[in-house]
């Protein structure tokens, strides 16, 4: 009985002090079709075939968190292999699913000018890239 009482006191003494972990998610769309879903634990690469890109194709990223800030600024930064910022997309609303988009033709044009074949995508203040894009 003493052990049960001790375990109960320990559990109820610790439980109010613990916080739930949160997982932020990014949904990635090619035009209007969702192609990937990432979180901070499963960064992946998206491969895009150059011969299938149309002039109006785009990538859109929607970010969701349980700590949204509708009035905060948000942005995507696309960096090349040499860590140069290639494209920056800005918007309003952090973690509420606000869509941030960039045109694939702009990224492809940069690829042809620079010779870079892969790009890392960063979201706002996250210091790790959320995914990468590679052209084939």
Image (spheres, helix red, strand yellow):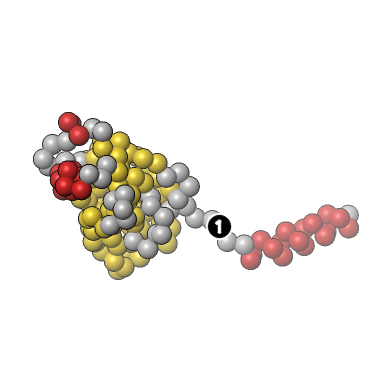
Residue 98 visible in rendering:
no
Residue 84: image x %, image y %?
Answer: 28, 57
**Residue at coordinates 20% horizontally, 41% vertically from top-left?**
31
Quadrant placement of the N terminus: bottom right
**Mark 1: secondary structure:** loop
In the displayed structure, does residue 128 sit left or right of residue 134?
A: right
Where is residue 71, by image quadrant?
A: bottom left
Q: Which residue is depicted at the point 11% across and 40% down?
A: 55
Label 1 packing within 10 angstroms: few (<14), some (14-19), many (20+)? few
Q: How many marks?
A: 1
Q: Which residue occupies the foreground of this view, 72 or 123?
A: 123
Residue at (72%, 65%) from the top-left corner?
13
Read off the residue under disc 1: 20
The picture places residue 56, in percent across and down from the top left corner, at 12, 42
Quadrant where the C terminus is found in the figure: top left
19 up-or-down from 110: above or below: below
Q: Is residue 4 above or below residue 131?
A: below
Q: Is residue 44 left or right of residue 61?
A: right
Q: Does any portion of residue 106 appear in the rendered image? A: yes
User: Residue at point 31% right, 53% down?
Assistant: 82
Q: Locate residue 108, reporting x and y percent.
A: 18, 43
């Amino acid at each position: 009985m003493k052990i049960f009482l001790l375990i109960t006191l320990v559990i109820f003494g610790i439980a109010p002090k613990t916080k739930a972990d949160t997982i932020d998610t990014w949904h990635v769309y090619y035009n209007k079709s969702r192609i990937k879903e990432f979180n901070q634990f499963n960064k992946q690469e998206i491969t895009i075939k150059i011969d299938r890109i149309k002039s109006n194709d785009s990538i859109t990223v929607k970010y969701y968190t349980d700590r949204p800030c509708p009035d905060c600024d948000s942005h995507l930064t696309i960096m090349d292999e040499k860590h140069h910022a290639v494209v920056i997309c800005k918007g309003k609303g952090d973690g509420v699913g606000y869509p941030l988009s960039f045109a694939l033709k702009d990224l492809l044009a940069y690829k042809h000018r620079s010779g870079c074949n892969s790009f890392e995508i960063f979201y706002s203040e996250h210091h790790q890239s959320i995914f990468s894009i590679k052209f084939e």
